[in-house]
Amino acid sequence: MFRKITNTDKEIYFEMSRTFYSCGAALKPISDEKRENFWKTIVEDIYVNGYIIECDGRVAGYAITVPYASQESGGVVLWVDELFVKPEFRGRGLAKEFFAYISASADKTALRLEAEPNNQKAIRLYESIGFRHLPYIQMIKYDEE
């Protein structure tokens, strides 16, 4: 049901990533140039874990996780950077199964993620499996700014 992304998944990953970044789950769309650069990081499997989600023998989605060390958490936190399930596979519990899978298989002290405020369906899902809101303000500064 969940497997590591391989080089042969590039086109289907790009297609799903384009949908993810244009459906309101992310702050803004990204260029294929950024997607291509990130793809290299995924397949090198150094900083990022990429997964393909399968259901009934078909590709149903993808997920990206990134481990990082956190003194506050007392070890490694697994950041769930992206989780996308194709619309035709939603409502089957695949996202919950993915969280159970990484919870059982990853050496970590916590899971962390972010969600767009308008993505209420995802927020309700995350809350239902134990995620809670943090009192932090997220900030970012891109290199090109």
Image (cartoon, rainbow, N blue to C red):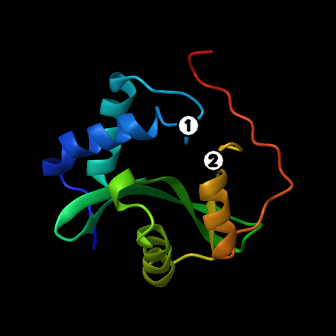
Up/down of 102 relative to 91, above or below = below
Mark 1: secondary structure: loop
Q: Quadrant of the C terminus?
A: top right
Q: Nearer the viewer, residue 86 or 44?
A: 86
Which amino acid type corresponds to the residue marked 1 in the rendered image?
Gly
Question: Residue 97: x percent and y percent?
Answer: 44, 76
Residue topped by disc 2: 119
Where residue 33 sits: x, y (%)? 34, 23
Lower position in the chain sequence, tag 2 or tag 1:
1
Task: Name the residue that disc number 1 marks.
Answer: 24
Q: Residue furthest right?
A: 135
Image x and y of residue 126, in percent? 63, 66
Residue 75 horizontal side relative to residue 23, left or right: right
Q: Label 1 neighbourhood size at 10 Å, few (<14), some (14-19), many (20+)?
A: some
| Three-letter amino acid code at the position of disc 2 | Asn
Quarter residue 39 falls in:
top left
Residue ID at (65%, 43%): 116
Rendering quarter of residue 128: bottom right
* Residue 142, picture quadrant: top right
CB atoms of marks 2 and 1 within 8 Å: yes
Residue 79 pos. (x, y %): 56, 59
Q: Is residue 60 above or below residue 94?
A: above
Front residue of 65/131: it is 131
Residue under the image location 67 percent in, 52 percent down: 120
Q: Is residue 76 left or right of residue 53?
A: right
> Whole-Å distance between the Cαs marked 2 and 1?
7 Å
View extreme (left): residue: 8
Q: Is residue 49 visible?
A: no
Residue at 69% across / 33% down in the picture? 140
Q: Is residue 137 visible?
A: yes
Q: What is the secondary structure assignment of the residue under circle 2?
A: loop
Of the 4 image quadrants, the one containing the N terminus is: bottom left
